[in-house]
Amino acid sequence: MDSSQAPWRLRLESALRTVLACSIVGCTTLYGPESVRHTITFPAFSYVTTILIVSDATLGDALRGCWHVLCASIQVILPSMLILRLIGPSRFNFGLAAVAVALSSFLIALPGSTHLTAKRIAFGQTVIIYVGAVIQGAKTGIIIHPIHVAASTALGAVASILAMLFPYPHLAYREVRKICRFYAENASNRFNLLVEAFCAKGDMAAHNLITDARLLSKAGAKLIGSIKDKHEGMLWEKPWLRFLKPKRSDPGEKLQEMDMPIQGMEWALTTCTSFPVRMMDEELVDVLQIEKKQIALKLEQAMRSVPFDAATTPDMKGENTDRSPWTQKAISTNREDLSSFFFLYCMELLQDGPACILKNGEEAKIQESSQPKKQGKSRVKQMQSFHRENFVFAIKCSLSLGLAVLFGLIYNKENGYWSGLTIAISFVTERQATFMVANARAQGTAMGSVYGILCCFIFKKLTDLRFLLLLPWIIFTSFLRHSRMYGQAGGIAAVIGASLILGRKNYGTPSEFAIARTAEATIGLLCFVAVEILFHPSRSATLAKTELSRTLRAVQDCFKVISLHTDQKENLMELMREKQKKLKYHVRELQNFIAEAELEPNFWFLPFHCGCYNKLLISICKMTDLLHFTIHLIGFLSAASQMLGVTWEEIQEQIKNILEHLVDKTGSLSKCLDKVLLIKSLEEIEKQLQMESVSQDLELGKSPNADVSTRLGYEETSISEIEKSFLQYTIRVADKTERNEVEEMLKSQMVLCLSSLGYCLNDLKREATETEKEIAELLKWENPTRHVNFPELLSKLHAT
């Protein structure tokens, strides 16, 4: 199968499995034995449970879903029997049912160890039990009523398992293996395109090849995401994988490590100013072709290997090179040549893994010894934050469901279930685009209901065949779930809306039921939105600004750690591991806030500048990945310089100077965001800075109108001088004569790594400059009526 066709074929297969699961539920509840139909008194919730479990699922996911159903039933059924026994079904009124739902929901949502799917199912069971007690009154069976709810839920779980087993088992393990092969094919094609672009003899041909590789890169990222999504299901199918090391059991992590050097090759080519590159000659072309074959062998093994060994490096046999392709290449002080050397460095990473002098055992020892030192405090902070988030989530669920049930019963007692059930399956633990989710659910509910009404109208006399019309709708909505317009929320609401009309009997007139359910769903969604606004009054656009400032400070912290600890490998690795983890967390949060802000209604506020924020996110993500390369290069160079007797202090000082410049730049940008975009108006900030600047200049005996551009120009000149000195040091290392072949090879690797480090530092500076430009544009967007001299403003902020 072509990897470009993989997504829609996988979605079609998932849709057909969903059709099979819903068919099992429909046939059981409509045409099953009388005793079974008498027990399954809530077929609507059977459909809901099935769709929650089986959507884009594998056998492992279905097994996990059954476990969630069991956990939810234990949490709900036994306590509800006790409450019904103590209070008595005949005493349940609207208010008492709402209070019972609210308290039960709070207790269900509070434990952090319970999976979100189990909580959603438990919320739905709670609503059905207590609203059912109000509707049925004294006829409600204290024991039988909860058991019927549990049986209806169990039917959905069993149908999901059967759908994953027939006509053949839909194994997560097999799916991951298949997607690993798709990714290996994708990576191989990308790699070939990038090597061809590097060897291209014209700018147009090179740019076309780079564009093709960039498109494949996006597809590759989606494939890695799919592998990570199916990882948990694979662990349920093969539980012994849980006892392996995380990176060995998770193929997504290993493939992501393989993807990073290919991404670096793409970056290197995008910064090349002209093609063919200056160092290209016949000898280098021949060497590249040999290495191309060797790396192709590695990717081919990834296609054939089991998932958790997908990125294992094969033994390279056959052709090999006597010397590295960069050994005889002249090093210059031209920045443009750094891109070519970084391209070759990424090829070496892809073929042999990161070059490192330390043995694996020594590295592991450093990692293990460094972890326990700060675990205590960080774990306490994480636990405090975790408990606070769980408590807020529990309060939100409690209020939303309690209010939805209360107003739903007041509006229409007979259909009071649907206001609570609509939002019971909507909760997520993290923030979400509230208005977008509510809008998608409302539209999905309306679409599904209208489809059901039309089918009932067209086939009035063929009531037994109505269920068959549900099957194509399930396939359509399975694709709808992956659309940007409706997403998971709208797609699930659409399929449930049609299932409740076409998949059941004896619920009254379809049109009347659809209108009543749509009204109840609207009541529930209004309660959901109101509670979300109450607990999260800040707009996503404002939170995106705040998170952008925090992310820039996290980038600044990484620069500080490298600049202060370039001579201490153990401390550097330990601190950078912690700082990079923090930075990646902030990048994910920023990405989530930007995605949410794009979908947020503007109301009377200034529109969200999504284009600017997305460019900022791209630059910050690239800096995050470049830091990963930088830290490994510094670690290698520090050890290699000691073995070769090269003075490390000289290059260390130059690295510090460049990084200190980046620290100052990112610090000024985060301070600008804090003071200008988040706290005060631009006019107030300018007045305050002018007063501070005048007082400081008078104390120093300087003119308050000194030209800021002179200082900025000097800064750029000094950075250029540092880079030139850095490259001259690389030339001296390249000219050094070694005593034996091993030292000569080590020297050639050191030259390559020095040039690559120069590229990384230069690219970090370039991305920092791009970040500065985008923040300047954001500042102008926020203050359209004022002229903003951004360099002068940054200089004043830095001075204060």
Image (cartoon, rainbow, N blue to C red):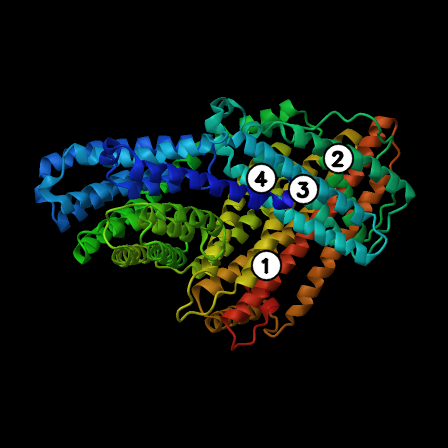
Residue topped by disc 3: 186
The one nearer the camera, 255 or 763, is: 255
- Give how far apart the Cα atoms at labels 2 and 1 are: 33 Å
Q: Residue at 74%, 49% (x, y): give it.
A: 268
- Give how far apart the Cα atoms at labels 3 and 1 are: 26 Å
- Give how far apart the Cα atoms at labels 4 and 3 are: 31 Å
Q: Residue furthest bottom?
A: 785
Q: Amino acid at mark 3?
A: Asn
Q: Amino acid at mark 2?
A: Ala
Which mark is drawn over residue 576?
A: 4
Residue 577 in the image: x percent, y percent? 56, 37
Which mark is drawn over residue 615?
A: 1
Q: Amino acid at mark 1?
A: Lys
Q: Residue at 43%, 61% (x, y): give it.
A: 600
4 vs 2, front mark:
2
Indicate the quadrant where residue 92 lies.
Answer: top left
